[in-house]
Image (cartoon, rainbow, N blue to C red):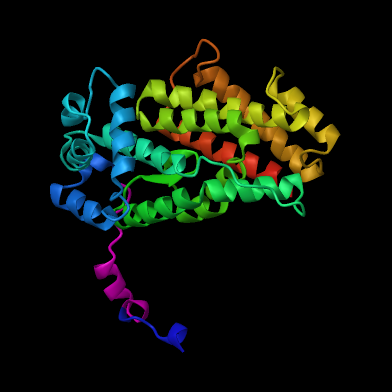
Amino acid sequence: MLEKFKLWSNLEPKAKQELHPDLGLRNWDELSREEREKIWHHMEYYFSKADRKYYTILFLNEGHKYQSYGKYFLTDSSTANASIDFKNIFLNCENGQHIVFELISYYSKAVLMEQAESIYRSSKETEIEFNERLTEWKYQKFDAFANRLNDVFEHFGINVVLTRCGLIPKQEQKIIQEVYKPVLKFLSNEKWKPVNRELRDAFDSFQQKNDTGYSSCVTHSVTAIEAFLQILINGKTGKNTLGNLLVEAQKQGSIPNDKFSNQIFKNLESIFAQERKETGDAHPKNEYANEKNALMILNLTMVFLQHCILCQK
């Protein structure tokens, strides 16, 4: 009975537009002080754990010693001062998108640290089943935090999404739900750590929002694919060109080898090779990548990985 009940905003499109306006995609620095305070209040419960904020400010200051954004914590490393610094950075940093997103990144790592201990394997579980359960257990608290943050950010049109790989550029919701999240969930297994590292660097580089960052994003994206194929073929990263890796992976049956997939892989290999040569950091670049090109390579990378991962299931 309850599921049949409709809210007014479900029945009246104009009401939904007014109550939940589409703000487009905005960066953090476009938010007013009032909007930041609203976000803070919506997230306050999830930001309430003092030990998480303590480790966040500790790592933030340690990682960025010159800036030492946790000013109060720097002179008196108390839990109370960590909480003061945390809220102050979140609400008050001028032109502070990078530091706020870094703050959230460190806080996310603090959440993950709470699940650092392992769990026991049942005698009835296969190794694959246990590893899948272990991965889900390790990300249980993080996923709850990320879901809340992403929901709040979506309401305010913030241009990033928190995933198991870190903060990534916001895409169309369908792309995020059907491509990015499933791929990053699959890769969150320890086996794919080198791939995750390259993808994280690609996302971080993209967030720099400059020519150097976009070019670095291209390089890390293609390297992530190479690392994925190397682990798929050899169980570890190594050396080989993308073209050779694709051929070898298909011979092993590790990735699709049908006519349709062959054409896709051929086209993607050509695009990746050309873009990395022209704008990436692996070679003397002819020009810097731009936002459009970098985002295209990021999306193609994720689609490529998704296509290969489907073959693993």
Q: Examine the image and state in which quarter residue 5 appears.
A: bottom left
> In this picture, is 114 found above or below 35?
above
**Measured along the vertical axis of the image, is residue 196 above or below residue 135?**
above
Determine if residue 182 is in view: no
| Image position of 143 (left or right of 48) | right
For this orientation, the residue located farthest to the bottom is 1
Q: Judge left or right: residue 68 versus residue 219.
A: left
Quadrant location of residue 308? top right
Q: Residue at x 24, y 53 (%)?
A: 39
Q: Quadrant of residue 232?
A: top right
Frontmost residue, 296 versus 58: 58
Asked whether, in this view, residue 298 is left or right of residue 91, the answer is right
Q: Which residues are magenta?
A: 9-25
In the image, 56 versus 281, the foreground residue is 56
> Where does residue 156 sit, x and y in percent of width and height?
28, 54
In the depicted structure, whether residue 294 falls above or below residue 257: above
Residue at horizontal 49%, vertical 14%? Answer: 286
Q: Does 96 sit left or right of 261 as displayed?
A: left
> How far across and down, in percent of the image, does residue 277 sit?
57, 18
Q: Position of residue 192 (x, y in %)?
A: 63, 34
